[in-house]
Amino acid sequence: MMESDDMTVGELYDEYVAPTYGRFSIHPRRGKGTQLWDEEGKRYLDFGAGVAVNSLGHAHPALLEVFERQPADLLHCSNLYQPRGQAELARILIEDIVKSRGKCFFSNSGTEANEGLIKLARRFGEAVPSSSGKPRRDIISFLGSFHGRSTGAMAATGQEKVRAGFGPLMSNFVHLPFNDIEALRAGLTEDSVAILLEAVQGEGGVRIATPEFLAAAAEICRERNMLLLLDEVQCGMGRCGELNGWHAIGDTSGIVPDGISWAKGLGGGFPIGAIWFRDRPAGEVSLCDLLGPGSHGATYGGSPLGCALGKVVIETIVSERLTENAGMLCGKILHEANSRSLPMISGVRGLGLMIGFQIDPDAVAGAGGFTGESKAASVIVVEALAEAGLLTVPAGSDVVRWLPPLVVTQAEVDEAFEIMEKVLNKLIE
Ligand SMILES: Cc1ncc(COP(=O)(O)O)c(C=O)c1O
């Protein structure tokens, strides 16, 4: 085998890895809790957590214990059989997270989970057609949303830059303005079969659905026998201070989704995704029965290792009261952000540990740190923060996200603010 010792990590990427990401020159080597060290031994505070994935932080003992135990028993087995762990994780998702009767299907990622919801909506539209007898096919999603990069999930995504150059995409997606109840009602037709939304848009810049908008979406779905599909891939699993992201928004007691997708935080770093669909009528049968044998699948989906990890992630979120930690720290973060000197930041918003810092374009225009740069303001800020030891994530061109592990401490939040304050003040010089 060819040795690569004569090449730097950057050179290896340039030569061998497809350039699909605008990657920062950071070479992570190991992590512990909220901290990460690179190849050169530099320490970072990891407030990106693999884009909301490392929910328990790095190297959590509960996850390490599963990695030691489960592969020795059974790493993978076919979905032609019935490994106990998969059904147990489904039971936990249904009984302890959603708390509403239904069934789960397991995938490997958020994109695949959303593909499952899209297929479910297609089947539902066949089972419950429009009054003219035509299958209902239109899925409503929202501008600014992100649902994945497969041809279906990309078509659902309400961002032109994600879809550009890949057409023709899967048809029958209608993108409407987010949080605009009037536009939502006006966009409905006989063909509308489902509404797909993130309660908090992540890639769209931490934009929070209003309780009124969510309630209106739920009401429309009830009135018109449509499916309410919630993409909890980024905002679910405790990230927003509640096990269910949409519960963090306010009074959402009347909102019962028909389908939910999860991934990211569910595996704590191991790729696993899931969907849940409600036990409710779909024509002659239950919605739970629409994806029958042969209609859907994933070779690796719901593997014994993935499911054992998912179970331990949820158990740890509950036993370590991590949703409470997220909720408590959110209040402090929003308060602190407003009392610190954070130049160029025109606003801060968020729920739990999903926080968006809005960059003010006018302030950037006059700031020395940005002159002559062709990169987006968010990327410049994220790069400067990383240089100073704080990892964050850009969202679009003008939002910087904090998505720390749910185990993050107040002391680490304080340290992150110290770094951010110093870096932003330097950037405007
Ligand atoms: C809300 C949401 N849905 C879906 C996805 C796609 O998930 P994955 O990258 O695991 O396929 C993402 C990824 O960022 C996301 O934020």
Image (cartoon, grey):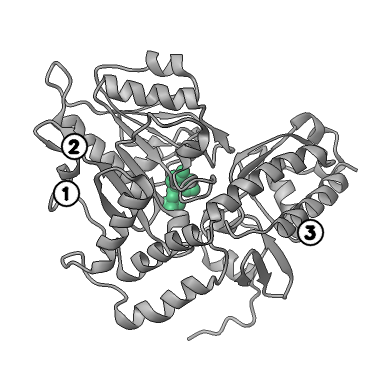
Name the residue tied to disc 2.
123
Q: Position of residue 170 (x, y in %)?
A: 31, 36
Name the residue tied to disc 3.
388
> What amino acid is labelled 3 in the image?
Ala
Marks 3 and 1, Cα distance to the nearest angstrom? 50 Å
The reply, left or right, for residue 110 in relation to residue 335 is left
> What amino acid is labelled 2 in the image?
Arg
Q: Residue at x 49, y 27 (%)?
A: 211
Q: Residue at x 59, y 64 (%)?
A: 14
- The quadrant of the rendering that contains the C terminus is top right
Q: Residue at x 17, y 26 (%)?
A: 135
Q: Do residues under tags 2 and 1 come within 8 Å of each other at their CB atoms?
A: yes
Which is nearer the eye, 284 or 393?
284
Instruction: Say few, some or many: other residues with alpha carbon within 10 Å of mark 3 (under 14 / 14 to 19 / 20 or more).
Output: some
- The yes-or-no answer for disc 1 within 8 Å of ligand 1 is no
Which is nearer the eye, 397 or 13?
397
Classify mark 3: helix, strand or loop. loop
Please say if 145 is above or below 314.
above
Image mark for residue 52? none
Name the residue tied to disc 1.
295
> What amino acid is labelled 1 in the image?
Ser
Query: Is residue 150 shown to the viewer in this render?
Result: no
Classify mark 2: helix, strand or loop. helix
Please say if 284 is above or below 67.
above
Classify mark 1: helix, strand or loop. loop
